[in-house]
Amino acid sequence: MDLIIGSHVSFTKDKQLLGCVEETLSYGANTFMFYTGAPQNTNRASIDVNKTILGMNLMKENNIDYNNVVVHAPYIINLANANDDEKYNFAINFLKQEIERCETLGINKLILHPGSHVGCGIDMGIENIINGLNIVLNKPSIVKICLETMSGKGTECAYTLEQIAEIIDGVNNKNRIGVCMDTCHLHDSGYDMSNFDKVLDKFDELIGLKYLECIHINDSKNNIGAKKDRHENFGYGYIGFENLINIIYNERIKNIPKILETPYVSLDDNSKERIYPPYKFEIDMIKNKEFNNNLINDIREYYKTSK
């Protein structure tokens, strides 16, 4: 089967979509995910139409399907807490702006962390998310908002499939809603990734596999159910190489884009600065279905010698 695999890549002010595609190709990938600006703030450069066209052309030349590319909404959007009207309206309006940027880029999938209730309670948080989504999704658009399954850290909402199902059930325009599974988040929230077919069965029963639009492929630094959300490099965590490979190559999700968000690698064992992207090497492992127990050193050597 054709493997649809990629990673998070950088959308820079200078190269924008063209740079995203170039980085993707350097990893041997055939899809990618990016933020249209910094995930922690509102700084956004105008979309350069010429760079977009150049990026689109490069994708066509390399058989990258535009329908498999995803944008991630910034973390600062929180639809779950409506106690502060100003912050809630900001979240709604900024999400609308991100949708408009996706439309300009031609991207039809926007991944969203549903939000944290910040003390108002999970039921109220879910109600706030539904209300916010119904405001945002009340007009036609090519862009689907894909709710990401969360780990349950802090006061996060949407860390169970039941909660995701409840949100989707409350959304009026269901043609514009979907789901992004995250393997680390599911594991950290208590789902057994060693029996992924059982997780898919539950997803299909509660939500419906037709809503599954993307999968974030991440290992976890934590034991199952830890609710901590700490990603680990592919095969180096508590989910493990074989389980992740089995997820990626599961026939039921073969047409779903898989995106790596694993940690960058530090200069050396004593450095906390993480500057080397692991994706070229992790994608090689995935394609070969062979675990690389020297992954970290191989990454360091490659980038040190390629400078």
Image (cartoon, rainbow, N blue to C red):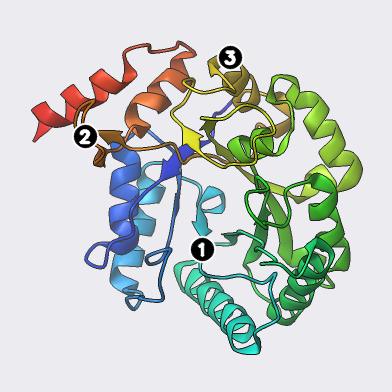
- Tell me the amino acid under the disc marked 3: Glu
Estimate how packed mark 1 is, as few (under 14), some (14 to 19) or many (20 or more) residues with alpha carbons within 10 Å.
some
Q: Nearer the viewer, residue 80 or 20?
A: 80
Looking at the picture, does residue 30 appear above or below residue 287? Answer: below
Residue drawn where x is 33% and y is 19% of the image: 295
Q: Quadrant of residue 123?
A: bottom right
Q: Is residue 217 left or right of residue 62?
A: right
Considering every residue shown, the one lying at the far front of the view is: 119
- Earlier in the chain: of badge 2 and badge 1, it is 1
**Location of residue 229 in the rendering, given as x and y in whole percent from the top left corner:** 56, 42
Q: What is the distance, in whole Å, between disc 3 and disc 1 at their CAs?
A: 31 Å
Which mark's residue is nearer the viewer, 3 or 2? Answer: 2
Q: Residue at x 46, y 41 (%)?
A: 261
Q: Secondary structure at mark 3?
A: helix
Which residue, given by chain and number where applicable, does mark 2 sit on? 271
What residue would you read off at disc 3? 242
**10 Å neighbourhood of mark 2: few (<14), some, or many (≥20)?**
few
Which callout, 3 or 1, points at the residue further toward the start of the chain? 1
- Tell which of 231 and 7 is nearer to you: 231
Residue at 76% from the left image edge and 67% from the top image edge: 125
Query: Quick one: 182 or 155, which is closer to the camera?
Result: 155
Q: Secondary structure at mark 2?
A: loop
On screen, residue 178 versus residue 271, left or right, reads: right
* Quadrant assignment for the N terminus: top right
Q: Is residue 305 above or below residue 292?
A: below
Callout 2 touching callout 1 (CB < 8 Å):
no
Read off the residue under disc 1: 75
What is the three-letter code of the residue carrying label 1? Tyr
Q: CA distance from mark 3 to mark 2?
A: 29 Å
